[in-house]
Image: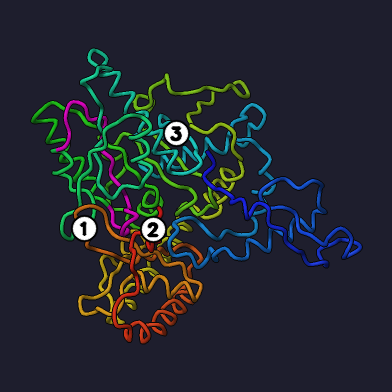
Amino acid sequence: MPLHKGTRKTAGHRRSVNPFYGETDPVSGMTEAPPTHRLPDSPLPPTTAYQLVHDELMLDGNSRLNLATFVTTWMEPQAGILMGECRDKNMIDKDEYPRTAELERRCVAMLADLWNSPDPSASVGCSTTGSSEACMLAGMALKRRWAMRNADRYPAKDVRPNLVMGVNVQVCWEKFCNFWEVEARQVPMEGDRFHLDPKAAAELCDENTIGVVGILGSTFDGSYEPIAELCAALDELQERTGLDVPVHVDGASGAMIAPFVDEDLVWDFRLPRVSSINTSGHKYGLVYPGVGWALWRSAVELPEELVFRVNYLGGDMPTFALNFSRPGAQVVAQYYTFLRLGREGYRAVQQTTRDVAMGLARRVEELGDFTLLTRGDQLPVFAFTTAPSVTSYDVFDVSRRMREHGWLLPAYTFPENREDLSVLRVVCRNGFSTDLADLFVEDLQRLLPDLRRQSHPQTHDKDAATSFHH
């Protein structure tokens, strides 16, 4: 069943088209535009097809002004050229494109070293289309390892594996539990704690727990979950009960922030209980979408039966992915960025982004109408809500009015236990400069007098108004 449906009226709608779109004779054959919901009967000149698609896409939001997305919206022209040169290469064809496969292998080795693997040469990993796929792979490995340890009693009708996580996890983890028939045990938010509590997570574990997910950078507010404290709580659980529960770190964003600007924070393979880590190369890895990475401490954490092996140049290249055909361009772009920036370059970019986030958060707070939940001092992300004294408008009004100025500013309600809390969230990325932050504050300040004059908030359906989708 298609997810996008064209109505009968729309499908049959006839439109006119600008005669200048014709290549030679501007009126020849161009009195009517092609249909939009069925294949046209005949070809179009490439310039005409381009202009029609280009004009329709003009109504999309400006990605550089999208403060909702974590995804990279700017790269250097040289990276774009490299991606254009590799967009026809299928990443799965490692025999045919051995150098692209080698760049993937190098990226995995670099990440293993960056994340303090005890033996980077023994770590295994792969590229993915993004963190969602990487999380699925990590979850599959956790479940398969648990099933192998419990082969004497699973599968059975009364035995169901479970995965423990905070209620703030990205939706891909709920998908994993649904698709792979795993019970999702979620630690709720409480008061001003908007992510997982280590002790509460340990209390949810039992003999059917395949693992616990810790989030290094919650999408709800940009805060890091306490990975070291989580591992300590699970260490104590093992001492009491004998249960040995592994941890997967979902570092979709934070795994490319913390190594550079929070070097003293222990969250990665330095913790023996951390079995696997994922990140999004297309977020703070600074690459256009879509590329992600999944790494395991060693081959022990990734069951051999899940690995598909390809022989190239007399060597053995293990692959482990849900998707088969996908372009090699993003992997090449990731290697380019690693090579281009190095540790010092990444540190400079991430620190600058954090400085912009913290400075912008402070200026929003100084307006007096808003209360900060976070300040951008972990992920370069901060969440804020209207101050208790503000009754004439809500966060959804702010989001709607800022869109009039081109800003895509997400407003959303927190999950169960804190559904009373509705917030706005700003994601700062490379390319979101101090100048753009200044413009953001100016536009926000400009619309506040109108909002303050409202008699009451204008949002009637908060569920329909929410702008939070990831």
Q: CA distance from mark 1 to mark 3?
A: 37 Å
Mark number displayed over residue 210:
none
Q: Secondary structure at mark 2?
A: loop
Q: Are marks 1 and 3 in contact (CB under 8 Å)?
A: no
Asked whether 136 falls inside the magenta stretch, the response is: no
Q: Earlier in the sequence, mark 1 or mark 3?
A: 3
Name the quadrant containing residue 78.
Answer: bottom right
Q: Is residue 218 in the magenta section?
A: yes
Amino acid type of the residue that numbered disc 3 sits on in the rendered structure: Gly
In the image, the segment drawn in magenta is 204-224
Residue 208 image point, x, y percent:
21, 26
Magenta stretch, main secondary structure, is loop
The residue nearer to you, when weighing 290 against 61, is 61
Residue type for callout 2: Phe
Characterize the local packing of mark 2: few (<14), some (14-19) or many (20 or more) Cα atoms within 10 angstroms. Answer: some
The residue at 58%/34% (across/down) is 102
Is any atom of residue 272 visible in this view? no
How far separated are the C-alphas under marks 3 and 2? Answer: 31 Å
Label 3 neighbourhood size at 10 Å, few (<14), some (14-19), many (20+)? many
* Rendered image coloring scheme: rainbow
Q: Is residue 264 left or right of residue 440?
A: left
Disc 1 marks a residue whose amino acid type is Arg
Front disc: 3 or 2: 2
Q: Residue at x 59, y 38 (%)?
A: 326
Residue designated by label 1: 418
Q: Earlier in the sequence, mark 3 or mark 2?
A: 3
Tag 1, which secondary structure?
A: loop
